[in-house]
Image (cartoon, rainbow, N blue to C red):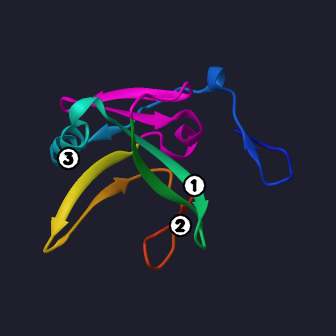
Amino acid sequence: MMNDNKGVEEFDIQDQSWSGVTTTPCAAKRIVELSKSGIIVRFSIKASGCTGYAYVIEQSEVPQIDDVKFVSNGCVFFVTLSAMPMVDGTEIDFVRQGLNQSFIYHNPNVKNECGCGESFGV
């Protein structure tokens, strides 16, 4: 990854050796539920919060040209290519605590997180 001194990081996909993104069985079950009727699940990131990035999950009818397809624990999901340098090696989990439920990201690239857990930095 290179920094052009303007705050924008660049990478060449040919120079990358990807570990991939995986799911726990609970996350895979939830992704399958969200993928019914031909809908796909896509994970990405966006600039947000006090530490830099926030995870984004969305549903779509078709993958985008820059999506990377993953299969883990029997589910199919996509990750935007631009997010891969920040999320490579991540395991996605899905937890329910009382009435709350959410995807949890075990991301080995995270260097810091905000106090509320909404954003992360790499």
Q: Indicate the position of residue 27 as horizontal and vertical percent values.
A: 22, 47
Estimate how packed mark 2 is, as few (under 14), some (14 to 19) or many (20 or more) residues with alpha carbons within 10 Å.
few
Q: In this view, does 103 lie to the left or right of 54?
A: left
Q: Which of marks 1 and 3 is nearer the N terminus?
A: 3
Quarter of the rendering containing residue 81:
top right
Circle 1/circle 3 CB separation < 8 Å: no
Decide: is 16 above or below 25: above
Which label was assigned to residue 75?
none
Label 2 or label 3, whichever lies nearer to me, is 3
Q: Is mark 1 on a helix, strand or loop?
A: strand
- Kindly identify which residue carries mark 2: 112
Decide: is 34 above or below 97: above
The kind of residue tagged 3 is Arg
The residue located at (55%, 46%) in the rendering is 86
Label 1 or label 2, whichever lies nearer to me, is 1
The kind of residue tagged 1 is Lys
Decide: is 67 above or below 59: above
Q: Earlier in the sequence, mark 2 or mark 3?
A: 3
Estimate how packed mark 3 is, as few (under 14), some (14 to 19) or many (20 or more) residues with alpha carbons within 10 Å.
some
Q: Is mark 3 on a helix, strand or loop?
A: helix
Decide: is 95 above or below 9: below
The kind of residue tagged 2 is Asn
Q: Is mark 2 on a helix, strand or loop?
A: strand
Mark 2 and mark 3: span between their CA atoms?
Answer: 27 Å
Highlighted magenta segment, given as a residue range: 61-89
- Kindly identify which residue carries mark 1: 46
Quarter of the rendering containing residue 40:
top left
Which label was assigned to residue 30?
3
Of residues 119 and 33, the one nearer the viewer is 33
The residue located at (33%, 45%) in the rendering is 91
